[in-house]
Amino acid sequence: MNINLSEKIILVTGGAGFIGSNLCEVLLEKNNKVICLDNFSTGKEVNIIDLFKNDSFTLIKGDIRNLEDCKKAVKGVDFVLHQAALGSVPRSINDPITSNDVNVSGFLNMLVASKEASVKRFVYAASSSTYGDSKDLPKVEETIGKPLSPYAITKYVNELYADVFAKNYGLETIGLRYFNVFGRKQDPEGAYAAVIPKFVKQFMKGESPTINGDGNFSRDFTYIDNVIQANILSLITTNPDAINTVYNVAYGERNTLNDLVGYLKEYLSEFDETISNINVNHGPNRVGDIPHSLASVDKAKKILNYNPQFSLQEGLKEAVKWYWNNL
């Protein structure tokens, strides 16, 4: 989708991470100046190594928990795309204090710095975890439940703070509730690796991945290019009704983990046919997980003109190709 956005100065926090680095890349391609703020706690230099060739790219090594770093990063900036966070429900359960420091205190620092620098718009990564124990399907932005993890609490608090800053200080904010984002540059390593890159790497090594539960839990898996589209639309919209609210960012279709594994084996078998014979293990359900997730994307379609181009299957084909060539 060709969306016009050029000759702006845009700060991407967490710009060396999975989503942030993809955003940096596309914004540079669209002829913008891009500043990346990252402390490399989860981001990786390899994700942005090619961007250093571009004179319009600047890296600031800093931490959103440090207000002075935030103030330095927002100086002269038109827009902020705030992606910096400590993700992962299990990580937040194991270490709620650090998740809160980064995701809440760091978020507040970025809001304060953006307000003081008169940033035109602050677009931030919200999360589908905010829906908590709500059993409604599909998930609609105005109806949420109680959070089920410290991570979910932090992401909901972000939305509350953004709303308060919009009302009290006139800062334009837009929150994007991401649903299970996947794609190129997503890290397969570590204890908190997302399921898709982790499974891809295990299959490529001839190992049997372990599904939490019986595999019938379902998710609205969202390819990275859909997420990039939503971020850029959030920056360029001139519709006053589009500002100071939150949107689901997803494809609007759910697939079970068993479905996901079937697609992965099919697409990876095109590179190595022995992968089709690898069996899958099943373990216990994970604490803090909800059984099913499905987004309504009607609000984003109607107000932002969001039009997701990649289904799970289409996105997986692209992701598998990338992993095969880069792992």
Image: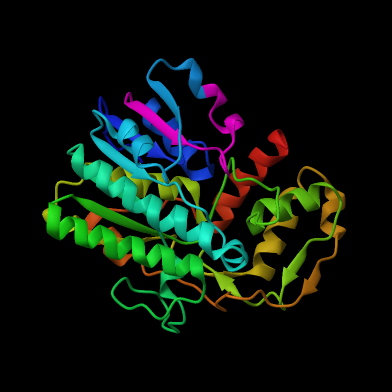
Q: What's the residue at 73%, 37% (across, down)?
A: 327
Q: 202 or 166, which lies in front? A: 166
Asked if residue 37 lies in the magenta stretch, the reply is yes
Which quadrant of the figure has residue 257? bottom right
- Closer to us: 28 or 317: 28
Q: Where in the figure is residue 215, as x and y percent of width and height?
A: 69, 74
Residue drawn at 28 percent across, 65 percent down: 160
Q: Is residue 304 left or right of residue 124?
A: left
Residue at the location (63% across, 76% down)?
Answer: 287
The quarter in which the N terminus is drawn is top left
Note whether residue 8 is visible: yes
Magenta segment: does it hold 102?
Answer: no
Q: Position of residue 180 (x, y in %)?
A: 52, 60
Tell me if residue 221 can be seen: no
Q: Quadrant of residue 24?
A: top left
The range drawn in magenta is 30-50
Spot occupied by residue 107 in the image (x, y as percentages of width and height): 36, 52
* Rendering coords of residue 314 (x, y %): 55, 51
Q: Residue at x 51, y 59 (%)?
A: 99
Query: 255 left or right of 29?
Result: right
Examine the rendered structure and indicate whether residue 202 appears above or below residue 321. below
